Amino acid sequence: MNKPVKPNSLEAYWMPFTANRQFKAEPRIFVGAQGMYYKTADGRDVLDGVSGLWCCAAGHNRPEIAKAVSDQLTELDYSPAFQMGHYKAFELADRLANLAPGDLNHVFFTNSGSESVETALKMAIAYHRIRGEGQRVRLIGREKGYHGVNLGGMSVGGMVANRKMFGALVTGVDHIRHTHGLEANLFSKGEPEHGAELADDLQRLCDLHDPSTIAAVIVEPVAGSAGVLIPPKGYLKRLREICDKHGILLIFDEVITGFGRLGTPFAAQYFDVEPDIVTTAKAITNGVIPMGAVFAQKKVYETFMQGPPNAIEFLHGYTFSAIPAACAASLATLDIFEREGLMTRAAGLAEYWQDAIHSLKGSRHVIDIRNLGLIGAVELQGVEGQPTKRAFEAFLKCYERGLLIRTTGDTIALCPPLIAGETHLDFMIETLRDVLKTID
Ligand code: PXG
């Protein structure tokens, strides 16, 4: 095996969403990965408690995916995305459409969650215009929502720290209230009992702006980046009802919930709510090659398929939409999911996981615990005047002890690969339990 090359300087690389100076003073470098584990530059195994960044759902270094990509690169390396096609793009779209619920049977390819979101927002606005409702231009997001980092997604997003540095953002956007922190819901197991009525906040915005001006509402069925916020029972159904009443498209951003995270292919099936558009990315290729996919209802696609047959119906797309290597990686990923039952595996682990993570109730600093499917969050009391400090300390200490976690604000998020066994889940919880004892 090649020895990893060690650069002389870490300076040139401006790292994304990273404390660059802290990192460069104490670098954390991965040099390998296998199954549930990363290998660090200092030779330690680190259990991946977060599937990379919610993407390596089938575990690391799956040889089937590597072979599919490698074979693809020597057969057809690149095929123009516009006005040309290659078989795997059609095959993949078809297989994905079969996984999605109801009429969500057309797939538009992108290269990331952020691009999927921009695509969905543009699709929604253009859809209404083609139907003769060009006044429907307003986009509604939710406080604490995360929809990637591009201007549209950031504008409908509701994470204050991500927004505040970047100007006035896209106009014509408003937000419904978030569902976080209801006293009565603290330490809820699974879906919280209280708060379905928070969906009625959409009606408030309809009353304010007039529903005829609203194109779409975008929400994460389970909010990830804001610290794992589980929707209250009945909340998403209520959002759907209000959208239906007013002709507003409902977009589910399933960038983290897609591909088995809740024990169903998509959260839409878990919550039995059929959105008009679904955005995905991450686990679609098991994280190995950038790819995203936007699922559109038949009615949305068919609305676009009008006008002269040689006219481009949707003036949108990316050079790397559905590149052959990403399609090959995704098809191989779906094969693994099918063979190993990963699309539903989280359902079987969910109860064990729920009991395990809730056993941390009473640990030092813990003020809430949330879970659903194979997702969990432990919220810590922040240090007065120094938000994020305590959780970041937990992150560093877990890493030292061989566990990779994610933190956002003072919440620890966990989402291990779907191949995890009970002993892996136990290791995660026991490591966290020990670490919590040691942080101030
Ligand atoms: N939508 C949602 C719901 C996401 O979670 C994006 C869009 C953007 O995806 P890209 O591929 O452009 O990054 C995301 C990304 C975390 C974490 O730890 C979450 C994301 C990315 C990195 C870290 O919560 N989500």
Image (cartoon, helix red, strand yellow):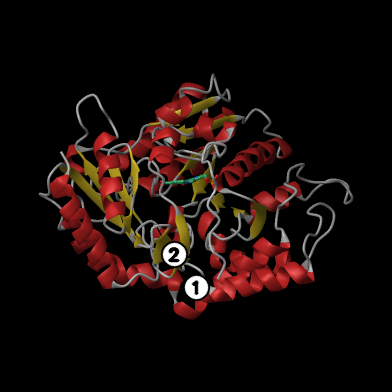
Residue 142 visible in image? no
Q: Pointer 1: what residue?
A: 337
Give the crowd class for mark 2: few <14, some 14-19, many >=20 residues within 10 Å.
many
Q: Mark 1 and mark 2 in contact (Cβ < 8 Å)?
A: yes
Q: Which residue is more in the foreground, 275 or 119?
A: 119
Determine the image quadrant of residue 241. top left
**Residue 416: x %, y % from top left:** 36, 61
User: What residue sits 38% from the left and 56% below the top?
Assistant: 50
Say left or right for 369 vs 258. left
The answer to whether 265 is drawn above or below residue 397 in the figure is: below
Q: CA distance from mark 2 to mark 1?
A: 9 Å
Identity of the amino acid at label 1? Phe
Of the two numbered discs 2 and 1 on the same chain, state the one appearing first in sequence. Answer: 2
Vertical arrangement, residue 187 with respect to residue 269, above or below:
above
Identify which residue, 394 or 216, lies in the foreground: 394
Image quadrant containing the C terminus: top left
* In-image side of 315 versus 389 (left or right): right
- Residue at 15 percent across and 46 percent down: it is 438
Q: Mark number for residue 247? A: none
Q: Residue at x 45, y 78 (%)?
A: 340
Task: Please give the name of the residue rendered at 52% of the width and 55% of the height, measured from the top-left corner.
Answer: 282
Residue 376 higher or lower than 348, as above or below: above
- Give whichever of 349, 124 is nearer the camera: 349
Q: Secondary structure at mark 2?
A: loop
- Residue beneath disc 2: 260
* Residue type at numbered disc 2: Gly
